[in-house]
Amino acid sequence: RWSRGLGDVYKRQLLPTAAADNRCFWEAVDRVFGKGRKPRSLNGFRHVTDIGILRQWGEQQLGRTPTADEVEAVQVHFLAGLKHVLDTRPETYRPRRGLVEWLQRHSADPDTRLALATGGWARTARFKLEVSGLSSFDLPMATCDDGLERTTIMRRAFARLANDLPSNPREESICYFGDGLWDLLSCNELGWRFFGIADGPGAERLRNAGATRISPDFIAIDA
């Protein structure tokens, strides 16, 4: 049976927070560094993780890598922005359709193991898991606090399952759920199975890049 890993809390497959995340992230950057040019797309970044985006933005806009204190300040303002979203638009943190039931079903499956791999920072990821109720599943998690590259984060999430696995599965037996091209490319690099959780243009981009398993939500995945 596959060891199924849930990909990237920062993006949309677990919670519909992409727009709020993007706005709050760049508002936090503006607060720390002053108004600066925002990128049009995340596809231009070498590493689509919070720390990877911030570092590359700093190199391009500041001519240097942000300091540890500046990174900390961005995280603090980012989290404050997400908390404001909770106060004004709590529906933003409602889990994607069918996700809770899917987690309940597979958490009880003795042949399946679940972990979270997110390109976000740990503090913002934990906040979103808590307010959405998904923290109740108590899944092992790796974040960009564990590594700059997405593949590093994915490997770390898998490693945190290692002591709980009934055997040592091959890399190709792992299934990773994601919605970005960077998720698909990372899976191709690692030799993991990829399942896209996306619809509309996002699904089309994944399909054009070679993804064959795509669902708009968690309702139809098992089928």
Image (cartoon, rainbow, N blue to C red):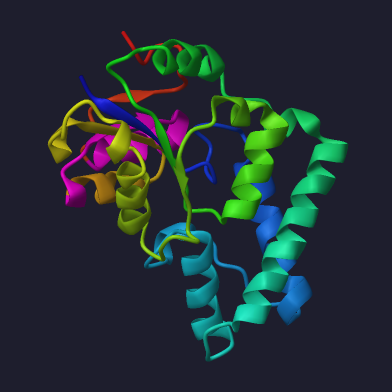
Residue 136 vertical position relative to residue 60 in the rendered view, above or below:
above
Give the image quarter of residue 138: top right
Residue drawn at x 34%, y 26% is: 113
Whether 99 is among the magenta residues is: no
In this orientation, does residue 181 appear? no
Horizontal arrangement in the rendering, residue 176 relative to residue 170 (left or right):
right
Find the magenta span and give its range: 189-209
Please state which of residues 72 and 179 is positioned toward the viewer in this rendering.
72
Horizontal arrangement in the rendering, residue 91 relative to residue 184 (left or right):
right
Residue drawn at x 71%, y 59% is: 78
Residue drawn at x 59%, y 88% is: 62
Q: Quadrant of the N terminus?
A: top left
Give how far across and how far down residue 205 sits, in percent.
34, 41
Give how far across and how far down residue 68 sits, in percent.
60, 79
Q: Quadrant of the C terminus?
A: top left
Horizontal arrangement in the rendering, residue 116 relative to residue 2 (left or right):
right
Residue 11 vertical position relative to residue 112 in the rendered view, above or below:
below
Residue drawn at x 30%, y 55% is: 151
Please state which of residues 199 and 54 is positioned toward the viewer in this rendering.
54
Residue lying farthest to the front in this orientation: 163
In this orientation, does residue 74 appear? yes
Residue 119 vertical position relative to residue 14 in the rendered view, above or below:
below
Give how far across and how far down residue 28 sits, in percent.
73, 66
Please state which of residues 164 and 6 is positioned toward the viewer in this rendering.
164
Give how far across and how far down residue 34 sits, in percent.
76, 80
Give the image quarter of residue 140: top left
Residue lying farthest to the right in this orientation: 87
Whether 198 is among the magenta residues is: yes
